[in-house]
Image: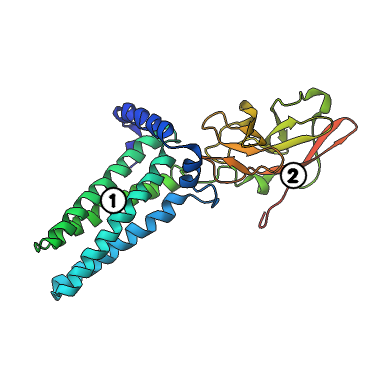
Amino acid sequence: MDRLTELTALDPVAERLSDLVHSTIPAPVRDLLHGVPLGHPAHPAMAMLPAGAWLSSAVLDLADVVSPSRSRASAAALLAGVGVAAALPTALAGLVDWSDLHSDQKRMGLVHAAANEVAVALVSVGVVRHLRGRGGRRWRLAGTAAASLGALIGGHLATRWAVGANHAEDVPHRAPKDWEPLLPLAELVEGEPVRGRCGDVDVVMVRRGGNAVSVLADRCSHLGAPLSEGSVEQVRGRDCIVCPWHGSAFELEAGSVVRGPAIAHQPRFDTRVVDGVVQARIVTVPGA
């Protein structure tokens, strides 16, 4: 499956489709489909419905092979139809997530999407054939098999290629729990992100006036971009640092997600100034 990331012939399609997503779907809607309000990717959660419906339909179809029953066949077709209906918003959420990935991830994602599109087409034919009194069991089973292949590729994307993972999850486990000196306050220019080091963790520091300094983990939780190479902007009325790769915005004060595609908050640090030197320590979370 890793070889799917080498299919560079898919790049022109990926570029045009990504541009289409960003130009036609408003940012607040994309945030909703990313799962920003949930703090969890929406696409895999939504995928449970079509996958569960199609697998349940397949169980009934296989049982119908052993013991034919008109009511069982009708129930199988109904479940298959529910899965097709649920697949449409699920695919839209997946498309929005996919549009903000690296090029190698996008290549594999296109194959994942193609398998699922084949699944929807096959299952739909099976449902229509049932409604016309022409069975359709084989079509529905073939569609479920295609969906299973798509799910296998999708799982590989999520685990092997870290799509949807929190790329800053390890920070609270590695960062110093005690105060650690960073830089002299005089070296920080107000509103300019500066990269620093707190123990073993790269951080981004932003002076916000006087002795106020915000310190967040430098590696973006979305795909690991260096936030210190981003910009400080007002986003939806809040002071944020904006990721240079995909535009995720994190509130400077709390590290919370103001705009996706990131869904996980950025680890933040308490700060103080002692003898003109900025010191920081990690704000711990449960389990860290």
Looking at the picture, how far across and down is residue 196, in whole percent?
A: 71, 30
Q: Is residue 213 above or below residue 43?
A: above
Residue 134 position by quadrant: bottom left
SS under mark 1:
helix
Residue 208 position by quadrant: top right
For this orientation, the residue located farthest to the right is 275
Residue carrying label 2: 176
**Amino acid under disc 1:** Leu
Residue located 33% across and 49% down the image: 88
Residue located 62% across and 32% down the image: 227
Q: CA distance from mark 1 to mark 2?
A: 44 Å
Q: Is residue 84 left or right of residue 30?
A: left
Mark 1 vs 2: CB contact within 8 A: no
Q: Is residue 263 above or below residue 70?
A: above
Residue 106 position by quadrant: top left
- Marks 1 and 2, the one that precedes in the sequence: 1
Q: Quadrant of the C terminus?
A: bottom right
Q: Is residue 279 above or below residue 134?
A: above
Which of 37 and 261 lies nearest the eye of the viewer? 37
Looking at the picture, how far across and down is residue 16, in whole percent?
A: 35, 28
Q: Nearer the viewer, mark 1 or mark 2?
A: 1
Looking at the picture, how far across and down is residue 229, in whole percent?
A: 61, 26
Other residues around mark 1 within 10 Å, as few (<14) / some (14–19) / many (≥20): some
**Amino acid under disc 2:** Pro
Residue located 54% across and 32% down the image: 247
Residue 2 seen in this snapshot: no
Residue carrying label 1: 149
Looking at the picture, how far across and down is residue 251, in whole percent?
A: 66, 39
Q: Is residue 237 left or right of residue 82?
A: right
Residue 125 seen in this snapshot: yes
